[in-house]
Image (cartoon, rainbow, N blue to C red):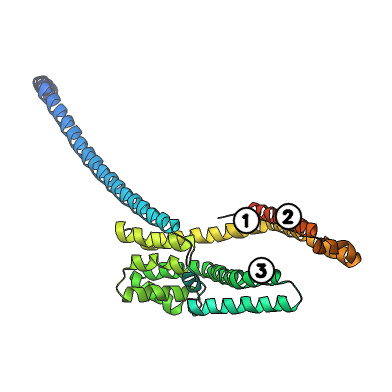
Amino acid sequence: MFGIDITVMALAALVAISAAALAYGLLFSRIESEKKAEGRVRKISAAETDRAKMKAARDRVSELSKRRKSVQDSLKELEKKQQERSAKTAPSMKVRLTQADLSISIGRFYLFSALFGFFAFLVVLILGAGLPIAVGFGLVAGLGLPRWFIGYLVKRRCKKFLEEFPNALEVMVRSIKSGLPLNDALRLIAADGQEPVKTEFRRVVESQQVGLSVTEACARMVNSIPLPEVNFFAIVIAIQAQAGGNLSEALGNLSKVLRERRKMRAKVSAMSMEAKASACIIGALPFIVALLVYLTSPAYMMVLFTDPRGHLIIGAGLFWMSIGIWVMRNMINFDI
């Protein structure tokens, strides 16, 4: 009985295996075709996914190229305006007085210059110099010294502005990141900033109150603070207004650039200090030698002042010394 059961089971197993082999043989082509169909479907799906990703990437690249082109157009337009502004004549004395933050009128400035020149003329004339020399001193004192003093005030004010401007930009970055709009950030600097940044941003806010846009108000700041850093700030605001973007990041990068420029300027000044000292010594040496020779042998030096040929020699020497000083000044001054 047990042997019969084993035989039946073996026959059943052989029949099942034969049926499976027959079914597999008959359905093999169909199974393979279904596998190939599934493979093609997967490839098509992957191709469609890749196509969608490529389309999204192309869209992003196209958007970036459009934005880059918009920024380039804005930069070209701003650069053209800047070149047109630079091609004009030098700023008038009224503008220079505004840059120096002086409240006097242009008429009063010319009056003070004339009085100062007349006073210098009288002093030199009383000291015994001739009339031509007194007139020359009066013209230099009336036309040159007041303008030089205004230029000195403008440079000193611009230097103070550069020291505080990066800090003001950092405050603006934090204000914008905290959710304040640009106008409120400008008002914050105008209210709590340090001079002269406070005064300039107050002018920007006041310009907005009379109808100017933020871009126009910031662009006008360069008229009172003639610095490339202020022009950079106006360009950043103009680009953000036209092309959009992360203003806080742009202002933060500008602040870093300004700090690096200041570090580089200080480094160049320190490295060129030896050359400046040498230039000062070389420029002052002829006058020191002339003074020492005059103190030891007055008659030997007075020939230059009493003889007409001495006047010619002094004039030629001063002319060539002026050229040498100008050349040395250009050699040791660097624009950053």
Where residue 251 sits: x, y (%)? 42, 62
Residue at image point 83% right, 62% down: 290
Q: Give the mark nearest the N terminus, 2 or 1.
A: 2
- Which of the two residues, 130 or 228, is positioned nearer the viewer here? 130
Q: Which residue is under mark 3?
A: 136
Residue 239 in view, yes or no? yes
Picture coordinates of residue 95, whole percent (x, y): 46, 70
Q: Where is residue 149, by image quadrant?
A: bottom right
Give residue 148's quadrant in the image.
bottom right
Q: Nearer the viewer, mark 1 or mark 3?
A: 3
Quadrant housing residue 169:
bottom left
Q: Which mark is residue 333?
A: 1
Residue occupied by mark 2: 316
Figure check: 79 above or below 167: above
Identify the residue at image location x=39%, y=63%: 248
Residue lying at 72% horizontally and 55% vertically, measured from the top left = 321
